[in-house]
Image (cartoon, helix red, strand yellow):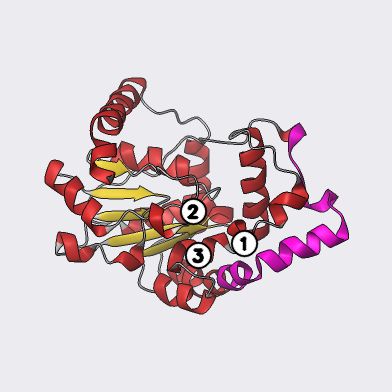
């Protein structure tokens, strides 16, 4: 049974909300925080030796996730069993623009739009996260090995399907939104950009667009077809419950303290 989970977290695809949800459901889940700004660079990867050190220190760990986890590193060679790899993809243009706006508003990086679109690091970001290169066909093949692939545009529906995939425990998919961009008024919007900049952004993300469309039309659709029950009815009920859901204050505090202890006392040592 592949009851060790590994979440491959892509920036601006709903991952922070999902991390909170995973901590809430799995008491021994670890968020792997990056120690490098450029999380798609090989030096930032959470290598197998780091996982080995983590499990030596915390043998009860039942899942990891973060910007630096990589399925193609084959973590199963360390834990000697199958792993439940999963991720969420987002429509590439909206993800790219959200990445820009997050860096400007939250990380306080004063990007001009021309600078950002000319920085190749942000191009085809999702494909590079999945396979380490800008090859969407190879990224798609890698995703075929995953236990689940969600879509940010279908976030709630994806979580209902994820609940059925995580069938070795009771998985509660109720969540609160986290890490949203604070100011809509300061947001740079794609439809307000010049024609040349729009074209450049589309060109920058063409590989991601190919990957996203292939996943949406095939992997995601097949997962939906395999859903047990009436997903439309379940989604209606789920959204109704979600509208007034709040995490337990006490449990949230305990999770926060547990994460803080891990991060400040152990994480840097493990990642050296």
Structural distance between the alpha carbons of marks 3 and 2? 10 Å
Mark toward the start of the polypeptide (1 vs 3): 1
Mark toward the start of the polypeptide (2 vs 1): 2
Instruction: Give the residue pinned by disc 1.
Output: 123
Q: Is residue 254 visible?
A: yes
- Of tags 2 and 1, which is closer to the observer? 1
**Label 3 near label 1: C-beta < 8 Å?**
no
**Label 1 near label 2: C-beta < 8 Å?**
no
- Residue 140 vs 171, above or below: the answer is below
- Residue 115 vs 259, above or below: the answer is below
Residue 8 quadrant = bottom left
Dominant secondary structure of the residues highlighted in magenta in the image: helix
Instruction: Give the residue pinned by disc 3.
Output: 128
List x then y, in percent, for residue 85.
Answer: 33, 61
**Helix, strand or loop under label 1:** loop
List x then y, in percent, for residue 37.
Answer: 49, 45
* Stretch in magenta: 185-213
Q: Characterize the local packing of mark 1: few (<14), some (14-19) or many (20 or more) Cα atoms within 10 angstroms.
A: many
Residue at x 28% of width, y 45% of height? 271
Residue at x 60% of width, y 56% of height? 122
Residue at x 43% of width, y 77% of height? 141
List x then y, in percent, for residue 133.
Answer: 49, 70
- Quarter containing the C terminus: top left
Instruction: Give the residue pinned by disc 2.
Output: 10
List x then y, in percent, for residue 4.
Answer: 23, 55
- Of tags 3 and 2, which is closer to the observer? 3
Mark toward the start of the polypeptide (3 vs 2): 2
């Amino acid at each position: 049974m592949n009851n060790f989970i590994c979440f491959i977290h892509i920036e601006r695809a709903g991952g922070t909300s999902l991390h909170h949800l995973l901590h809430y459901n799995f008491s021994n889940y670890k968020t792997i925080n990056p120690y490098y700004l450029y999380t798609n660079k090989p030096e930032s990867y959470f290598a197998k030796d780091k996982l080995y050190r983590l499990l030596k220190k915390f043998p009860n760990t039942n899942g990891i996730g973060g910007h630096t986890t990589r399925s193609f590193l084959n973590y199963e060679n360390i834990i000697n069993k199958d792993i439940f790899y999963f991720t969420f993809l987002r429509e590439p243009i909206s993800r790219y623009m959200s990445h820009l706006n997050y860096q400007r508003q939250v990380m306080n990086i004063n990007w001009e739009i021309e600078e950002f679109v000319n920085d190749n690091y942000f191009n085809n970001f999702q494909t590079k996260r999945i396979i380490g290169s800008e090859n969407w066909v190879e990224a798609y093949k890698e995703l075929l090995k995953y236990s689940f692939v969600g879509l940010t545009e279908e976030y709630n529906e994806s979580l209902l399907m994820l609940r059925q995939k995580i069938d070795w425990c009771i998985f509660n998919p109720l969540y609160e939104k986290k890490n949203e961009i604070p100011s809509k008024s300061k947001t740079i919007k794609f439809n307000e950009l010049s024609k040349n900049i729009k074209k450049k952004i589309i060109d920058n993300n063409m590989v991601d667009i190919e990957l996203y469309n292939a996943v949406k039309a095939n992997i995601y659709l097949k997962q939906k077809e395999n859903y047990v029950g009436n997903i439309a009815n379940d989604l209606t009920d789920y959204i109704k419950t979600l509208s007034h859901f709040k995490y337990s204050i006490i449990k949230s505090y305990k999770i926060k303290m547990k994460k803080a202890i891990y991060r400040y006392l152990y994480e840097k040592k493990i990642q050296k």
